[in-house]
């Protein structure tokens, strides 16, 4: 069993006539045709047989009206896909007033607005909704992203997908779900990229995947970045308590490291400057007291020894 894959279309530039020149030409022909029509009609009223010009002038009215329907305008960063009797002829990208074959198709080409196959080439922003997905470790999270995109190949956008705007929206959601499942929210292994701490790397990976998915529709991705990232409500409180506990532990580690270095510095200074000679037992007591003072959360009230050092 064999399956046939649809061929991919590529944009071809096409040149059309200047609209202002064609407008004046068509208006001149219309005025001339009216003059001929009036002139020949006056001869018929006098009893003369209708000349051939009379019939031609009548036929020219619908022809000129049809020719005038070939006039169209394009704004900057706007293009028109030209289709003649079902065959793709090319794409007009030059802005201004133009005239083309009046039989060029006016179908919407899969778009939701029948605007004579006009496609905007301006940059567009897709602000995605919050999605609930599972990260690499299976934790439910909420994630959202914003996408800046534009149409690069008009032929692919019109003929290779049914509705390129809907295609961009659907594929963006699918790519975001896939990227979120490839990374952990946080607390990954050593040198592991996580969603919370490596936003730039995750956004770059999202852009690469979107470019691969949307290239079929002739869409170029200019920017893709995360706009929302949080745990799902059902586990948010538990994860918040875990983060708070980890923050307390990290702070305690800093305090202990600082206290140890200060005690070590104090003992070295006392020994080098020969301020006092302490045996191991007194050093241990001094270290214990200093650690209590430096690591305690509440203010310490020392007890002053009025006797000797060994009483």
Image (cartoon, rainbow, N blue to C red):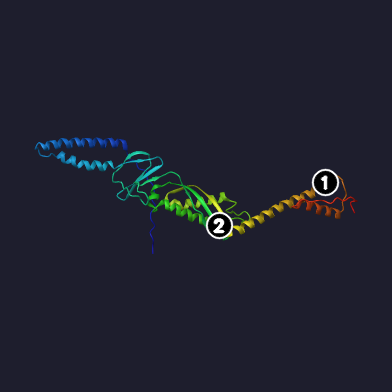
Q: Residue at x 16, y 41 (%)?
A: 55
Residue drawn 18% across and 36% down? 36
Compared across the picture, whether 53 is left or right of 128 comes to: left
- Image quadrant where residue 194 sits: bottom right
The percent coordinates of residue 266 (x first, y second) are: 81, 48
Asked whether the beta carbons under mark 2 and mark 1 sit within 8 Å of each other, the answer is: no
**SS for callout 2:** strand
Give left or right: position of 57 versus 129.
Answer: left
Residue 24 on image: x %, y %: 28, 35
Residue labelled with disc 2:
141
Give the class, few, some or many, for how many residues have Cα within 10 Å of label 1's Cα (few <14, many ≥20). few
Q: Which residue is mark 1?
A: 269
Which residue is rendered at x = 71% and y = 51% of the image?
A: 254
For marks 2 and 1, the one nearer the N-term is 2
**Callout 2: 10 Å neighbours few (<14), some, many (20+)?**
many
Residue 237: quarter of image: bottom right
Q: Which is in the foreground here, disc 2 or disc 1?
A: 2
Residue 52 % position (x, y): 14, 40
The foreground one among 49 and 90 is: 49
- Residue located 83% across and 54% down the image: 285
Residue 112, position as x, y percentages in the image: 37, 51
Distance from Cα at disc 2 to Cα at disc 1: 53 Å
Question: Which image quarter holds the N terminus?
Answer: bottom left
């Amino acid at each position: 069993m064999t399956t046939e894959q649809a061929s991919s279309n590529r944009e071809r530039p096409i040149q059309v006539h200047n609209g202002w020149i064609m407008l004046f030409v068509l208006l001149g022909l219309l005025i001339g045709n009216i003059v001929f029509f009036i002139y020949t009609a006056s001869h018929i009223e006098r009893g003369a047989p209708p000349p051939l010009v009379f019939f031609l002038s009548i036929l020219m009215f619908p022809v000129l009206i049809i020719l005038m329907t070939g006039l169209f305008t394009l704004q900057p960063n706007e293009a028109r896909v030209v289709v003649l009797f079902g065959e793709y002829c090319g794409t007009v990208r030059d802005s201004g007033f133009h005239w083309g074959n009046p039989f060029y198709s006016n179908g919407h080409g899969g778009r939701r607005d029948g605007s004579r196959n006009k496609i905007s080439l301006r940059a567009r922003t897709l602000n995605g909704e919050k999605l609930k997905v599972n990260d690499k470790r299976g934790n439910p999270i909420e994630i959202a992203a914003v996408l800046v995109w534009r149409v690069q190949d008009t032929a692919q956008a019109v003929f290779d997908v049914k509705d390129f705007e809907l295609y961009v929206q659907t594929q963006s959601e699918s790519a975001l779900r896939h990227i979120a499942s490839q990374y952990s929210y946080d607390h990954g292994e050593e040198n592991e990229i996580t969603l919370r701490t490596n936003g730039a790397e995750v956004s770059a990976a999202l852009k690469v995947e979107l470019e691969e998915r949307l290239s079929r529709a002739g869409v170029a991705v200019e920017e893709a970045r995360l706009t929302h990232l949080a745990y799902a409500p059902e586990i948010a409180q538990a994860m918040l308590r875990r983060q708070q506990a980890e923050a307390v532990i990290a702070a305690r580690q800093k305090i202990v490291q600082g206290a140890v270095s200060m005690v070590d510095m104090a003992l070295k200074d006392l020994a080098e400057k020969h301020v006092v000679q302490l045996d191991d037992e007194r050093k241990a007591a001094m270290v214990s007291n200093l650690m209590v003072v430096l690591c305690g959360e509440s203010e310490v009230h020392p007890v002053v020894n009025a006797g000797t050092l060994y009483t």
